[in-house]
Amino acid sequence: MKTLGTMLIRFKSFGPIRRLLEKQMMEVEVPSGSTVLQVVQRVAEIGGAKLKDLILKNGGIDGNLIVMLNKKDVSTLGGIGISVSEGDEIALLPHVQGG
């Protein structure tokens, strides 16, 4: 049950983030009007120091991660400062590298 003035956002994780959270999908309760960055910061708080070090850098989200909002790259939607709405889904994916 959520608190008045808050909303639930689905958070989906992959790779090392998923291993640290020990689950692929979770619901995160955040204040209404929160941004993508604020949701990710909340997830990092829940996940602890190792997760925080992995996903947050210099006041933002590590550039080695792809941030998706409702299956669209946030860089095409206005960046990590855009607001989220009740029921939105944020996903963090590691960049795939290889050759």
Image (cartoon, grey):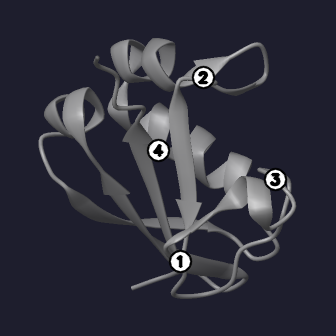
Q: Is residue 38 visible?
A: yes
Whole-percent x, y for residue 33 in the image = 82, 73
Element at label 4: helix
Looking at the picture, which amino acid does disc 4 mark? Val
Classify residue 8 as left or right of residue 21: right
Relative to 56, say whether 74 is above or below. below
Mark positioned earlier in the residue sequence (1 or 4): 4
Quickly name the residue at label 3.
79
- Mark nearer the viewer, 1 or 4: 1
Quadrant holding the C terminus: top left
* Image point (77%, 13%), residue name: 58
Query: Label 4, label 2: how many angstroms apart (C-alpha)?
Result: 11 Å
Asked which quadrant contains residue 94, the reply is: top left
State the image quarter where residue 84 is shown. bottom right
Q: Residues within 10 Å of mark 3 (few under 14, many from 20)?
A: some
Q: Quadrant location of residue 96?
A: top left
Q: Earlier in the sequence, mark 1 or mark 3?
A: 1
Q: Secondary structure at mark 3?
A: loop
> In the rendered view, would you say 59 is above or below 94?
above
Q: Which mark is residue 56?
A: 2
Label 2 Cα crowd, 10 Å radius (few <14 / some 14-19 / many 20+)? some
Q: Residue 43's x, y, as percent?
A: 47, 44
What's the residue at 77%, 50% (across, down)? 80
Q: Mark 1 to mark 3: distance in Å?
A: 13 Å
Q: How many marks?
A: 4
Q: How crowded is the residue under tag 4: few (<14 C-alpha within 10 Å), some, or many (20+)?
A: many
Look at label 2 and name its amino acid: Leu
Residue at the spot 29% in from the left edge and 63% down from the top edge: 26
Visible in this render: residue 35? no
Look at mark 4 in the image and give the residue it sits on: 43
Residue that numbered label 1 is attached to: 70
